Amino acid sequence: MDIVHDGQTLRLSGDFDVRSTMEVRSAIYEHLEGVERDLTVDLTDVQTLDVTAARVLAYATIEASRSGGHLRLRGCGPAVRRMLQISRLARFVEVERAAVA
């Protein structure tokens, strides 16, 4: 899992699964504990997402909201959307709509 922090955006690439959840969780919470409490997690280059990773995103969204911040997901491909739906965690996360071409 590669993580690039670019201002208010955290860009992830690779497989987001149980092996990378601690690293991603730390990067998200480090950002949310700073001055800027809004964060976009860009999943455009994430090929797979497992249920543990989906839970990390859902809990981070809830925690951001509790502390007055906002977390949204960008670039969710079909596999990521499917896992969010199957795990029933889609109701806890905000997914940006793709721009109309």
Image (cartoon, rainbow, N blue to C red):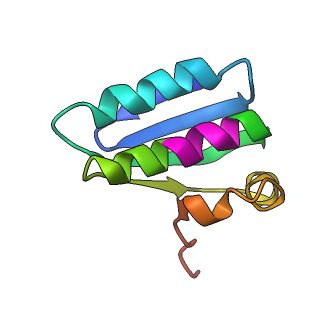
The outermost residue toward the left is 35
In the image, farthest residue toward the bottom = 100
- Counting from the top left corner in percent of width and height, residue 39 is at 36, 47
In terms of depth relative to the viewer, which is nearer, 47 or 80? 80
Q: Is residue 75 magenta?
A: no
Magenta part of the chain: 53-59
| Left or right, 52 with reference to 36 | right
**Count of picture labels:** 0
Confirm whether residue 81 shows in the render.
Answer: yes
Q: Residue at x 35, y 54 (%)?
A: 65
Q: Nearer the viewer, residue 101 or 30?
A: 30
| Residue at x 47%, y 50% (from the top left corner) | 61
Q: Nearer the viewer, residue 21 or 75?
A: 21
- Residue 54 part of the magenta-drawn span: yes
Name the image quarter holding the N terminus.
Answer: top right
Quick check: can you spot residue 1? Answer: no
Q: Residue at x 57, y 59 (%)?
A: 92
Spot occupied by residue 43 in the image (x, y as percentages of width and height):
60, 46
The correct choice, above or below, for 5 with respect to 99 in the image is above
In the image, taking residue 90 as reference, residue 83 lies left or right, namely right
- Dominant SS type (magenta): helix
Looking at the rendered image, the quarter that the C terminus falls into is bottom right
